[in-house]
Amino acid sequence: MVKAYKTMSDAMQHLKQRGFTANFEFLNNSFRTVDSGKTFSPDQLTIVEHHRFEGVSDPDDLSVLYAIEANDGTRGTVADAFGPYANPDLGAFLKTVKMREDMLHRKRRQDGDRLWSDEECDNASRNDCGEKGPP
């Protein structure tokens, strides 16, 4: 099961510890890593998990943090507002990106019909996302 975080900074810190170190930005209908400048199209990306933060008293807490993995193994995060302040272009882009969290956390392995552990989900590569589960 995907961990629930109280704050975005807690989520970002934990995701960084888990290897989501790249800082993605949405630019010209693609994702770009801020440090290297490498760009990725939607078919090269997978949303591994996402976390929504709803702050009743603080509008800055109305946001979504996405943990994303590229097909070359680059792992990072990108944040967006949600609701009326969300970036509609980023939202449309993300709708075309595959979501691994649904596959990894809900699919069962064929050998014994065992649920995937969080560690297996974290360690699985994009190529392991098929119907059979992790190797």
Image (tube, helix red, strand yellow):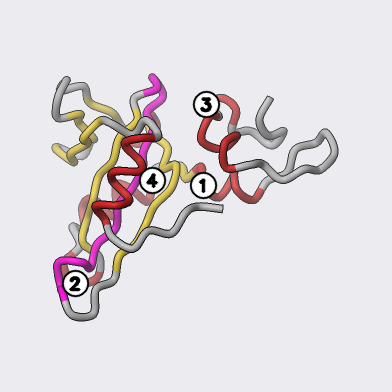
Q: Is residue 70 magenta?
A: yes
Disc 4 from disc 2: Cα separation: 20 Å
Circle 3 residue? 125
Mark 3 against mark 4, which lies toward the viewer?
3
Q: Earlier in the sequence, mark 1 or mark 3?
A: 1
Q: Residue at x 34, y 36 (%)?
A: 42
Q: Are circles 1 and 3 on residues that touch, CB within 8 Å?
A: no
Please tell me whether residue 34 is drawn above or below residue 106 in the rendered image: above
What crowding class fits label 1: few (fewer than 14 Cα within 10 Å), some (14-19), or many (20 or more)?
A: many
Q: Secondary structure at mark 2?
A: helix
Residue 23 occupies quadrant: top left
Q: Which amino acid type is shown beneath numbered disc 3?
A: Ser
Mark 1 highlights which residue?
101
Query: Tag 4: residue type?
Result: Thr
Q: Nearer the viewer, mark 4 or mark 1?
A: 1
Q: Which residue carries the number 2 mark? A: 84
Would residue 66 be found to the left or right of residue 115 on screen? left
Q: Amino acid at mark 1?
A: Glu
Q: Earlier in the sequence, mark 3 or mark 4?
A: 4
Mark 2 surroundings within 10 Å by alpha-carbon count, few (fewer than 14), some (14 through 19), many (20 or more) = few
Residue 3's place in the image compared with 104, above or below, is below
Nearer-the-camera pick, 85 or 63: 63
Which mark's residue is nearer the viewer, 2 or 3?
3
- Spatial separation of the CA atoms under disc 1 and disc 2: 25 Å
